[in-house]
Image (cartoon, rainbow, N blue to C red):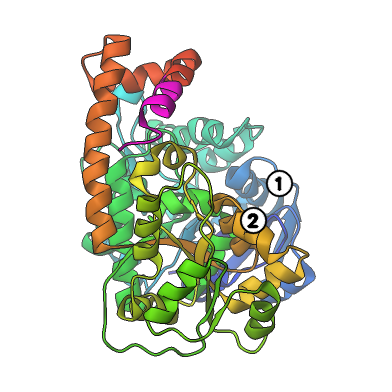
Amino acid sequence: MNRLGIFCFFNKEGKVNEYVKVLLNEMVRYFSKLYIVCNGKVSDEGRETLKKYSEFIYERDNVGFDAGAYKYAFTKLITEEDLKNYDAVLIFNDTFYGPFKPINYIFEEMESRNCDIWGLTAYNKFESKNRPYHIQSFFVEFMQSVISSGSFIDFWKGLDINFNDFFDCVNNYEMKMTSYFEAHGYSVDSFITNNIEGSMYLEYPYEIFVENNCPIIKKKCFTIIKNYPRYAVLDLLKLLEYVSNKYGECDWMYDDILRTYDIIKLKNSMQLNIVCTEISDYSENNISIYCSDENDLCKFENLGFTDIYSEEKSFIDRIELDDDIALVFSPLENKAVTKEMKDIIFDSIVKNKKYVADLCKKFNEHAYIGCILPRAIAYDCFNVFENEYISYGCFWIRKNILKAILKSGKKLSEIVLMRGNMLALEVQKYGGYTYTAESITSLNTNNAVNERMWREMLFHLRENFEFTMLEEIIEKLHADKLHRRRIKNIIKHKFYRMD
């Protein structure tokens, strides 16, 4: 097929990251000609990379999102006469990861359906949100019957691209594009067809990829938005595990995710938590431990650890010798951290040599893990509500990342006192994800306490606000800031400590 491609590229720094190369390596084979429209700048190095895929590279002001890029292409670069020479035009952008395998079968399938316009996915009619069915615009093909008509160019010429934000773009471009062409008598279809309301790629990424054989992951899956469905998080986790097992670690994807999104949001969307067990193949290979408390020091010695340091300078000198992993264990001394909580922290982060072996295994198997903190303790529930990460002054960390943080001017004592979220952001700066870890024992303890805590909390919320249903509480929380403050105070005073 004689197909024209229009690719919209955007990167704040103008860099062409590895995932874009993966995308273009697959897509370029389907085009007779490819135009690349860059929203904003592209670096010199990035331009050289893009030249491998096309000689037609254009930069424009970043106005109108991808809609602005396509309007630019169809009104400034390509004439109506040019379009008549092609069997189809495909517009696509860089808002997804993949394809993870060749997609020639998708083009073959959609050709066999004889539709005029098609996309990979569609947004099905959502009655409660008053949103109509429409093709999602990150990947859309227009067949010759459409592009040879005057209505195609008229659509782009008449499109107002001065959108207020992303949602305004969806409402006034993506939705209207489908309705416009349907009103002009063209048939519209999507590769994935189902009757599920809403945005399938956000809510069912596993089903899209595996069951519907559409090998992409939309980048928006890694962001948490208001009212984001909880089951979507589980579906994304299932998909990431599937992708890792079938296609390897996909460092190009994990690197871009880390560069693009706040690690605090990723903690929720990717559920960066691991449950460790005890395994027998333990090796004390280059594990260095910093422990400032004498009692805790004895614990490590009794467990058989040897590379232990109680002085900052000695520890810092030691980690300069290799780039393996280190444990910083200096539990914070305050009223909120009880002895019972300290025991749970130790159980989550150390426990014994066989448990540490499993932690080391996680670091070895996943190069993108930079730091592991203990899972937040349910007893410390007010802290849990305030922070995605809580360090308690105890964490495993890759030595190269710790050295980089130290070289930035921070002292070890300052790093120990960092709030968990701040430490996770520091680790992110140097290319690492921060996970939380817990043992089976601490998992069971947390589950039991969480169940009790939520039951008690709902009881007191209902008692204070005369609500009978959880949905009413949630609705009131969204609507009333005063209620949010009152509920926060109830949580703080009634649940900060649970004996």
Circle 2 SS class:
loop
Task: Tell me the quarter of the image containing the C terminus.
Answer: top left
How many marks overall? 2
Q: Which mark is residue 10?
A: 2
Against 383, residue 106 (above or below) is: below
* Range of magenta residues: 487-499
Type of the residue with mark 1:
Asn
Residue at x-position 39% and y-position 52%? 339
Q: Is residue 141 visible?
A: no
Q: Is residue 472 left or right of residue 13?
A: left
Residue at x-position 65% and y-position 74%? 311
Type of the residue with mark 2:
Phe
Q: In this view, does 402 lie to the left or right of 124?
A: right
Check contact, mark 2 vs mark 1: CB within 8 A: yes
Foreground pick, 194 / 145: 194
Residue at image mark 1: 62
Dot 2, crowdedness within 10 Å: few (<14), some or many (≥20)?
Answer: many
Circle 1 SS class:
loop
Q: Is residue 496 magenta?
A: yes
x and y percentages locating residue 71 in the rendered image: 63, 44
Foreground pick, 438 / 204: 438
Q: Quadrant of residue 303?
A: bottom left
